[in-house]
Image (tube, helix red, strand yellow):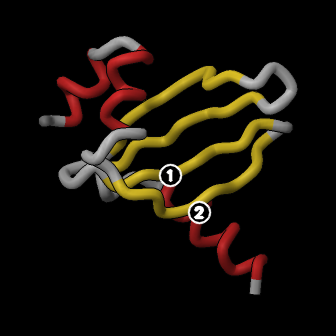
């Protein structure tokens, strides 16, 4: 599946891909009370936005491997050490 196709899907369809067997968990970070979770989907990465206060996924978005968002996860992992 291409990044463009993924991003054109509904949030439910994206969730089926990300939470199914087609993606691998890579990392997690927090942003303004939201939990952002990174998944490897092969040709691209997907980021899910989870709102713990309302117990719901509010957004799932794919992005390419050269996107600057990956730096935020690297920074978050460095803080764990």
Measured as percent of width and height from the top left, residue 45 is found at 35, 49
Classify 65 as above or below 19: below
Q: Nearer the viewer, residue 27 or 71?
A: 27
For the view shown, which residue lies furthest in the top direction?
Answer: 10
Classify 64 as above or below 79: above
Measured as percent of width and height from the top left, residue 59 is found at 55, 24
Look at the numbered disc 2 and give the secondary structure of its residue: helix
The residues tagged by marks 2 and 1 sit, at their Cα atoms, a distance apart of 8 Å
Q: Which mark is residue 38?
A: 1
- Which residue is located at x 25 percent, y 46 percent? 22
Look at the numbered disc 1 and give the secondary structure of its residue: strand
Which corner quadrant of the image does residue 62 belong to? top left
Q: Which label sits in the foreground, 2 or 1? A: 1
Which corner quadrant of the image does residue 29 belong to? bottom right
The disc, 2 or 1, on the residue closer to the chain's N-terminal end is 1
Looking at the rendering, in which quadrant would you find the N terminus? top left
Query: Relative to residue 63, is residue 75 drawn left or right?
Result: right
- Which residue is located at x 36 percent, y 12 percent? 10
**Pointers 2 and 1 in contact (CB under 8 A)?**
yes
Residue under label 2, please give it.
Answer: 73
- Which residue is located at x 75 percent, y 25 percent? 55
Measured as percent of width and height from the top left, residue 12 is found at 41, 16
Q: Nearer the viewer, residue 63 or 57?
A: 57
Measured as percent of width and height from the top left, residue 60 is found at 48, 29
Query: Relative to residue 12, is residue 69 drawn left or right?
Result: right
- Which residue is located at x 56 percent, y 62 percent? 27
Looking at the rendering, in which quadrant would you find the C terminus? bottom right
């Amino acid at each position: 599946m291409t990044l463009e196709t993924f991003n054109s899907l509904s949030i439910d369809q994206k969730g089926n891909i990300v939470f199914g067997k087609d993606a691998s968990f890579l990392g997690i970070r927090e942003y303004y009370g939201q939990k952002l979770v990174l998944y490897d989907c092969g040709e691209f990465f997907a980021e899910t936005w989870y709102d713990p206060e309302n117990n719901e996924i509010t957004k799932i978005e794919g992005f390419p491997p050269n996107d600057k968002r990956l730096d935020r996860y690297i920074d978050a992992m460095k803080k764990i050490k």
